[in-house]
Amino acid sequence: MASNQLVQYVVVRGDLLKLPLWTTGAVIAQACHASTAALWSHRNDPNTIAYTNELDNMHKVVLEAPSEDGLKELSRNLSANQIDHKLWIEQPNGYPTSLATKPYPKETIRPFFKKLKLFQ
């Protein structure tokens, strides 16, 4: 795997699966919303263009945030470090459920996510 491979990180709240009405499919939908919104919001970015020009070779890493507070803290940290991302706010509930970055070189972005585990 090339160190400059473009990757999109997607993070979902694992605690949602413990709440009534949140099925695995509903949580996956939140990840899809965040991913699509991040790509669309940054559609003119050179990394996004390169990433989507190779649709059969896209690489995503899907991780789990333990809670709403954990997801918000991650979003604040990414913003403070000028990492472009989309924090998805589910409506009409009005609370964050997931976030996704625009595509970045893997080695550039990996350090921001090293404390999170893979979503299961």
Image (cartoon, grey):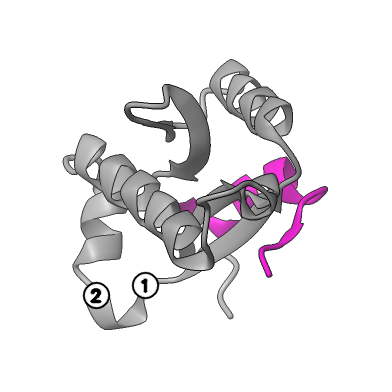
Q: Distance between the residues labelled 1 and 2?
A: 6 Å
Tell me if residue 12 comes above or below residue 52 in the rendering: above
Q: Quadrant of the N terminus?
A: bottom right
Instruction: Read off the magenta span.
Output: 104-120
Q: What residue type is labelled 1?
A: Met
Q: Give SS at disc 1.
A: loop
Q: Quadrant of residue 44?
A: top left
Does the magenta portion include 109? yes
**Would residue 46 appear left or right of 113 to someone viewing this image?**
left
Name the side, left or right, on which 33 lies relative to 1: left
Is residue 103 visible in this depiction of the protein? no
Which residue is denoted by mark 1 in the rendering?
58
Q: Quadrant of residue 65 in the image?
A: top right
Marks 1/2 in contact by CB < 8 Å: the verdict is yes
Q: Whole-percent x and y of residue 35?
A: 36, 51
Q: Is residue 56 left or right of residue 85?
A: left
Left/right of residue 53 with respect to residue 98 in the rendered view: left
Q: What residue type is labelled 2?
A: Leu
Q: Nearer the viewer, residue 99 or 113?
A: 99
Tag 2 residue:
55
Classify mark 2: helix, strand or loop.
Answer: helix
Tell whether position 9 is magenta: no
Residue at 30% in and 62% down: 51
The reply to whether residue 109 is visible in this rendering is yes
Query: Residue drawn 68% across and 70% down?
Result: 120
> Residue pushed farthest right?
115
Q: Callout 2: 10 Å neighbours few (<14), some, many (20+)?
A: few
Residue 81 coordinates in the image, percent (x, y) = 60, 23
Task: Please provide percent x and percent y for residue 102.
Answer: 39, 45
